[in-house]
Structures are given as C-alpha cells and as structure tokens.
Image (cartoon, rainbow, N blue to C red):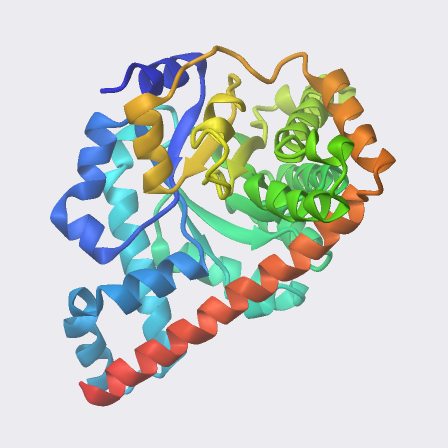
Amino acid sequence: MSNCLQELTGLGVSIWLDDLSRARLVSGNLAELVRTSCVRGVTTNPAIFQKAISEKADAYAPDLARLAAQGCNVDQAIRTLTTDDVRTACDLLMDVFESSGGVDGRVSIEVDPRLAHDTDGTVTQAAELWELVARPNALIKIPATKAGLPAITATIGAGISVNVTLIFSVDRYREVVDAYVAGLDIARAACIDLSSIHSVASFFVSRVDSEIDKRLDGLGTEQARALRGRAGLANARLAWAAHEDVLASRRWAELAAVSALPQRPLWASTGVKDPAYDDTMYVVDLAVDGCVNTMPEPTLDAVREHGRFRGDTVTGTAAVSREEISELAAVGIDITEVCDLLESEGVQKFIDSWESLRTTVAAAMASS
C-alpha cells in the first residue's frame, strides 16, 4: 500500500472512490480497493451510472430483461438498478461503517437531477431512495441549488443522512451549512437521535480551475498566467475556514452537546484536468484532519503510485487564499460569477447524463 494513502488516512483524510458499477462489485475490484488502497466510501452521480450501464451493459442485461418482462418503465428500471448497486456497495462497506462509528463506509446515491429546481420533488424522492436502499450507511445526494437548500433542511430534519453536492462557492457552502443546522434543529425537536444523522458537503475543485484558467489564458498577461491553477485550492481552503468558523460557534456547541455531528467538507472533482499540473494536487494540497476526498480511480492510482504526503496543507491557509482570490479579482475574474455558471452547468451536465442513461436503458429493455 502506498505510504501516501496510509499517511493521508493517518492524518484524518477519508478517502472515498468516486465511481461505482455492477462490474466493479462483481469482480471484487471495490473490495480490493478497500483492502489495499484505504478506500473508505463511495460516491456516485448520474454521469457515473450512465457510464456504468452504457459501457458494461452485459452486467445489467439479466436485470433489464426481468424488469422489462415485469412491465417496468425506464425510470423504474433505472431506480432499481442503481439502488441495487448502492445497496450492495453499502453491504460491502458495512465493516468500515461499523468500525468507524458510522463516520465512513458511506455510499451516496443522487436524486433525479431533473429535480434540481424542485424542492418538494427532491424531498419526496430523497425519502423514497432512503427507504429503497434501506441501509444506515447510505447518503442521499441533493444538489446545493436554491431549491435544494430547503430540501436539505427537510431531509435532514427527517433523520436522513445527506451528501450535499454541486457546491462551488464559499457563500453557497455557508448556506448549505445553515440548511444542515436548521435540519438538525427540526430533527432535535422531533426527538430524533442526532448522532444517527451524517452529512458531507461536496465542494467541487478542479472545475473552478478549468473555468478560471480559460479566462486567465484569454487575458494573456504575465500577471494572469501567474494565477493559473491557484483558484481551485484557494476557494476550497476558504470553504474549510468557513467550516472551522461553524465549529467554533455557540450555535454549533449547543448542537454538539446533544450529539450532533459536523457536516464534513468533501473535496469533489479532484481529477486534474490540465496535464501541466501535478495529478495529485487536489488530494495532497487539500489534506486536513476531518475532510473527505472522493476521487476517480486514475487519481487514486496517481496518489498510490507517486503521491508525496506533505502533512496538513489546509490549516492556516485562509489569509493567503483570500489574497489569491483578491488577485484574481484584480485582473477581472469574478469568482462569484464563475461559481454561479459552474453550478448551472453542473446541473445541466447531470441532466444530460441522466437522459442519455434513460435512452440506453430504454433501448436495452426494448431489445430484451
């Protein structure tokens, strides 16, 4: 096992795999990664399931034929396939879940991305997915859209553990934390055991650099070029500083006193897009006790093969990170506008993946 993976885990970084498929489960690959690569959780999204079912259709063919014979429609079939995979992964990770006191061993499944701007629909489907997976180590993914925020509160308030996804800005991250805390207040009033409610806040990293680097390249100045590859890390580190502020607040102290658990920041979109950058940068440069880092397998492989552990690379970086964001503003980069754009694009990309998945499943069911 890579020393870097071991050292990250020893520091308190929870390493999760950003991928899941029937083939990965059946082959024993996921179990192997848990044994040998410190993988302690799994995240999924519509794009991951679209790739899994489209590229490994044979693994799903018997179930698709059975569901077609039962008269299931496309959306019912997708829900059955995806919840079956997530349930199996939850069972595989149950030992990690139990040995970590419920902190890790988590598997995420996302509500239909077409509900991203539908609060009531999201709340309803989150409850349905929770019941269908029926495992205590599941996390229901809800996007951090404006409509998603009250859905997060309602879902947490019902005692359902949530992975809040598609967070790009520090301001939106603060709203997500407020939604989580409001949900805990509701759960507490309903006499729900707060220690049973877990949540992570998925803060996207590499997409921020990709969009801002493109704009910096367009400016073409030496000052702009010097800022390439710095926005994603600075933005995430400021989110961590906001997390620390929450933990130091009186309101959080009151909730912690009745066994509430912090909503851990989770670094998502950690695959490096620019080949000029270190392909482990969004892992080793965002290492801090108490975070989660979910990574695609190529990034996990890179950290295993040549990652260089440098200890805690987040604590105490807020002032420098604020200065880097100020430098971006000075050359005309509005990070708030960038993050708003990325959220909108992120929702649409997941919808596009979902529609592609529906097309694939419909064709497979028709031919079975």
Up the image or down, 34 lies above or below 91; here it is above
The answer, for residue 172, to whether it is visible in the render is yes
Residue at the spot 68% in from the left edge and 16% down from the top edge: 317
Q: How many marks do you count on the picture?
A: 0
Q: Is residue 293 left or right of residue 171?
A: left
The answer to which of 110 and 233 lies nearer the viewer is 233
Q: Is residue 122 above or below residue 293?
A: below
Residue 308, how many percent across, how many down? 40, 16
Tell me the residue at 22%/76% (across/down): 64
Q: In the visual, does 220 lie left or right of 33? A: right
- The residue depicted at 65 percent of the width and 42 percent of the height is 213
Image coords of residue 164 (percent x, y): 57, 46
Q: Quadrant of residue 301?
A: top left
Q: Residue 367: which quarter of the image?
A: bottom left
Task: From the top left corner, tell me how far across and down residue 178 is, in percent.
Answer: 73, 39
Q: Nearer the viewer, residue 124 or 209?
A: 209
Q: Relative to 311, say whether 349 is above or below.
A: below
Q: Quadrant of the N terminus?
A: top left
Indicate the position of residue 326 as horizontal and vertical percent values.
Answer: 83, 29
